[in-house]
Image (spheres, rainbow, N blue to C red):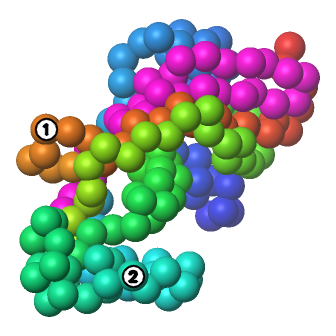
Amino acid sequence: MSQAAEAAIRRRLVPIETYRGYVDGEAFVSDWLLVDQAMIDTFADATHDHQFIHVDPARAKAETPFGGTIAHGFLSLSLLSTLAYDALPGVEGSQIGINYGFDRVRFMNPVKSGARVRGRFRLAAIAERAVSVQSTWDVEVEIEGAVKPAFAARWLTLAMLAEPLS
């Protein structure tokens, strides 16, 4: 089976007419994802951010109000890609998806090591161009058992299409 065929099976692709109907509709919700110390440590190594609140469980427990280590805010933000892939439909004919940026990001609650998070995505708007569809998503990443989400953002993505929209 080709990579494209495997990707289509894993991800729901819908016609542009269906995709348009998602604007201001129900939220798409991902599965839960564990943020463990190994993930946090790997991110610290990749970004060279080894602040003790992230990588030293004993010190973080003793010296912070968090009761242990917490994920980097940018680690939590970077998980949007995998959470979105799990939850969001794509537009039929998309060749690639691109992170186009953010209009807003607010970190509201730290993600503690061992917590599970999930994404809640609501399509706020789309901008159709000849060979792309820009999507504006209102996103919250929830922490299992917490009242406040880890963060809220307005995320812009771009689907590059194989052929022009008709």
Tell me the quarter of the image containing the C terminus: top right
Q: Earlier in the sequence, mark 2 or mark 1?
A: 2
Alpha carbon separation for disc pair 2 and 1:
26 Å
- Closer to the camera in the image, 62 or 92: 62
| Callout in the foreground (2, 1) | 2
Q: In the rendered image of this protein, does residue 40 appear above or below residue 88? A: below
What residue did someone put label 1 on?
147
Relative to 20, 71 lies left or right: left
In the depicted structure, whether residue 105 falls above or below residue 60: above
Q: Residues within 10 Å of mark 2 (few under 14, many from 20)?
A: few
**Which residues are drawn in magenta?**
114-142
Answer left or right for 109 relative to 162.
left
Q: Look at 26% across and 60% down and name the residue there.
A: 111
Residue drawn at the location 85% of the way across and 21% of the way down: 129
Question: Hey, what amino acid is under mark 2?
Answer: Gln
Residue drawn at the location 66% of the way across and 62% of the way down: 3
Element type at marker 1? loop
Residue 120 drawn in magenta:
yes
